[in-house]
Amino acid sequence: MTNQTPATQTTPSVLFVCSKNGGKSQLAAGLMKQLAGGDITVYSAGTKPGACLNPQAVESLTELGVDITGEHPKPLTDEVLDAVDVVVVLGTEAKLEAHEGTRFEFWETDEPSERGIEGMERMRLVRDDIKARVQKLHAELARD
């Protein structure tokens, strides 16, 4: 890697948002952190943060070697919104207005419970849907 001056060196940043910041946004953040290996700054937050992480979300990531046990639901702040390049809103529960000058994506993620699929089987399907989207976003951000 060549030495870059601070003026030209930029690390892309992404914020994953869902309503409680206990499941989908934590899944996306954990997957992106693993994939990016520090090349992308990753945040997650909730519009109405819950009390704890979804244990099935944690377990589904552990199956892929991603450890998010030290994470906790965090509120969405203007400081983080203003600091990131990309905001990804996951699911349909979180309501968030687009921020001028920031790229916004709205991911309507798979919801297997609508097909009667529950428990860990549901969580793995949600995780795998989010993983495919995170891989695509990572490829775009790493290229820019």
Image (tube, helix red, strand yellow):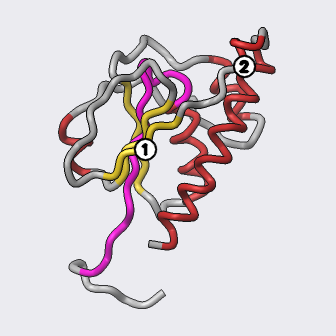
Report the side of 135 relative to 16 (left or right). right
**Is 21 a magenta residue?**
yes
Q: Quadrant of the C terminus?
A: bottom left
The reply to whether residue 70 is visible in this rendering is: no
Report the side of 6 relative to 135 (left or right). left
Q: Residue at x 64, y 26 (%)?
A: 58
Residue 134 spot, x, y in % from top left: 58, 49
Reading the chain from its start, which is encountered first: label 2 or label 1?
Answer: 1
- Identified by mark 2, the residue type is Pro
Residue 126 spot, x, y in % from top left: 68, 29
> Given contact means CB atoms under 8 Å apart, are the residues at marks 2 and 1 in contact?
no
Instruction: Report helix, strand or loop for mark 2.
Output: helix
Please give the label number shown on residue 112: 2
Query: According to the image, label 1 marks what residue?
Result: 105
Please give the label number shown on residue 12: none
The reply to whether residue 15 is visible in this rendering is: yes
Where on the picture, by quarter, is residue 99?
top left
Chain part drawn in magenta? 8-24
